[in-house]
Amino acid sequence: MRVKYGIDGYAFITDNSAEIDAKTLFLKTSQNEKYFDGKSAFITPLELLSKWQLDNMKIVGICGTNGKTTVAAAIYSLLLDVEEKPALQGTRGFFVLEERREDKIMTTPSIFETIVHMKEARDGGCAYFVMEVSSHAIEQERIEGLKFALKVHTNVTADHLDYHKTIEEYRRVKSLFFADETPKLLNKDLISTITYNPINAQSYGVDEPATFKVQAFSLINGITAGIKYFEEELTFHSPMVGLFNLYNLMAAIGAVHMVTGKPLEQICKAVEHFAGVGGRMEVVSRNPLVIVDFAHTDDGMLQVLQSMKEKSLSVVFGAGGNRDKLKRPRMGAVAGRYANHIYVTSDNPRDEEPQTIIDEIMVGLEGKVGVQIILDRKEAINKAIDELGEGDALLILGKGDEDYQEIAGVKHKFDDREVVREILKEKNSLR
């Protein structure tokens, strides 16, 4: 990937050593410096940010196991609604103001791609750059040179242990993001999951005392919450569902207030315009009630299922192949604790045998009544819908807004939401 923006007499900039020529400036990063020949002209990320005058752009980074995508999207939406000019980079793609420039990308791409996106955002008139920050990106220094205006913490639970090996190492890497004196906004109720530098730290919370504190809330017909910020008391309403989304919205409200200084009342009024992110607690059908969510860890499942525990729940889920195997029985145990009817199926098995993955999930469901194993995901969804009782809710977990199923290295078209709509359409036509 060579970028057309030239500086200092060079026509192109690249981070690929194989593309260097006399007209090309090499972006030397921590990731690629081992490939640098030592002779070509180069520039560092920090220098490039300065050359392109991006070092004063307000970067908001969101870091945590769950909630990054929703919090990033909520901050972006609220910034637009309070008449600021943001860009958004993350799992859902790259957006400049209200225009989608790229479809789904890595949670945190290379620093080269991020700087190019920042350049596009600045050229498009943006003053804010909202981005998701993954543990892989922190470990691999894919955010080197970036000066964050605010760092937001959602939570840290067990995930990516196939990469980090232990939960302690995973937490250590996440904590690195919050170790400096950059302004930060922390989830006070889950503060023990990281270590952090208290300088310039503010917090949000439901249970514990916090800078942005929920005083009272209702999860009936969406989310309604009364919050307190020092002596100021306000209320906001949201069409979103679930306790974890209350936390996500609090993170977004606090973040927007911290980086803009806009009145909290104005920000809270804008909350009702944000309906959430596709594939994150997305209501695909209301009668019967069918919800699709991306939850693919035991903690993610716990948050989703707890948020609906007042209903009789059916759940369809599996686990991804070639990923952390330790979470599989824990995912089964969480489903067994909250769901009345459980359909264990295939997720993205990748290079693993689907039955092997299911067997590992079933360890956590030993002795549980009402569990069915159905390898074919569409068949599992169909069966779950067929067996829904009056007033029951069906949660289909693991893939969210993914539109494929990866099996043995091949991506097959498969979208849980479209499958649900097709099944319901067919059933309605037979009535």
Image (spheres, rainbow, N blue to C red):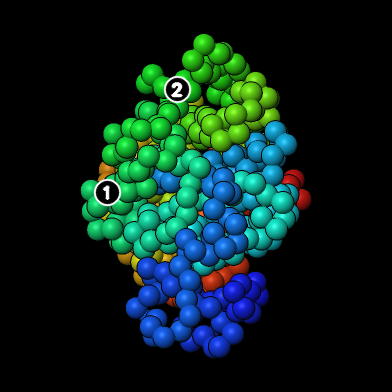
Q: Residue furthest top?
A: 231
Query: x, y (%) of residue 83?
Result: 73, 36
Q: Is residue 239 above or below residue 321?
A: above
How many circles with numbers are drawn on the protein?
Answer: 2
Give the numbered dot on residue 172.
Answer: 1
Disc 1 residue type (three-letter): Arg
Query: x, y (%) of residue 176?
Result: 32, 48
Q: Secondary structure at mark 2?
A: loop
The residue that mark 2 highlights is 211
Indicate the quadrant containing the C terminus: top left, top right, bottom left or bottom right. top right
Query: x, y (%) of residue 397?
Result: 49, 48
User: Crowding near pointer 2: few (<14 within 10 Å), some, many (20+)?
Assistant: some
User: Crowding near pointer 1: few (<14 within 10 Å), some, many (20+)?
Assistant: some
Residue in the picture at 51% in, 85% down? 20
Quarter assignment of residue 378: bottom right
Q: Is residue 74 visible?
A: yes
Disc 2 residue type (three-letter): Thr
**Distance of mark 1 from mark 2, alpha carbons?**
25 Å
Residue in the picture at 34% in, 78% down? 34
Indicate the quadrant containing the N terminus: top left, top right, bottom left or bottom right. bottom right
Residue in the picture at 38% in, 28% down? 188
Q: Is residue 52 above or below residue 153?
A: below
